[in-house]
Amino acid sequence: MTRTPLFLFDIDGTLLHGEGAGRRAMRQAFLDLFGDASGFEGLGFGGLTDRRIIRSAAAAQGLTLDEPTIARTLVAYRDHMAHDCTFGPRFTPIAAACETTRALATLYPRALGLGTGNMADIAHLKVAHVGLAGLFHFGGYGDDAEDRAEMLGIGLARGLEILTQTREAVLPVVIGDTVRDVEAARAIGATVVAVATGFEDPAALRATEPDLYLEVLELDALLDWLYHASRG
């Protein structure tokens, strides 16, 4: 049986580079609410959901946040991020990845989703800035879950509903640029394409043994792999 691909795309480092917008917005949210943003010193964002970033930075500052406080922090972060997206530096698209995504959207209508630690509205704001608006029909987001695997599982379930397919009939394909993307994909039983366009150490990314490793998200190589994987 040939399975239908169902894609879950990471955003930062996979489709675009954020030029530090997320870190600036999150730091400003912490300054607004807590008067201190020292928890972000040395904190890597790669592969973390927005909720996990907030909790990690708070812990580094000796804070334990309850759910209402996390929710307020997310709102403050979203507001600063939206302002920065509108009035600050624009995001830099990863050209090959964006071209590949547009081609996949034509080849596999309604099969493209997002699997990103970003909040949903911020995620769609970002992809719109690099010319990918309207291509992603479902997703798992950072405001759905703190754990990345749980978040991807939510995105997969939404994709199955959109495609009106059973889990057995699809080939879930997570596309990301971090070790955490690979680990989370494995946790939900998905195949994974790892791309070396983010800030992850390429050797560490290769060592996770993704189903496909690419220096850039190049269409021909991806389609060749998909042809065989969907029939496996």
Image: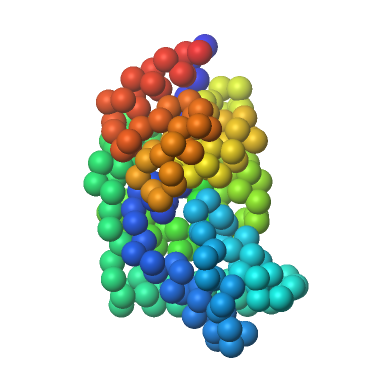
Task: Give the image quarter of residue 51.
Answer: bottom right
Q: Quadrant of residue 106?
A: top left
Q: Residue at x 35, y 45 (%)?
A: 197
Placement of 210 over or under 117, stated as above or below: above
Give the camera-side residue of 13 and 145: 13
* Image spot of residue 151 (x, y percent): 61, 48
Q: Is residue 228 above or below residue 89?
A: above
| Residue drawn 47% across the image and 13% down it | 231
| Residue drawn at (35%, 27%) of the image | 222
Q: Is residue 14 left or right of residue 66?
A: left
Asked which quadrant contains residue 50, the reply is bottom right
Q: Nearer the viewer, residue 215 or 33?
A: 215
Left or right: residue 217 versus residue 33 is left
Question: On screen, 166 above or below 146?
Answer: above
Task: From this view, report whether residue 35 is shown above or below residue 82.
Answer: below
Residue 131 in percent (x, y) is at 27, 54
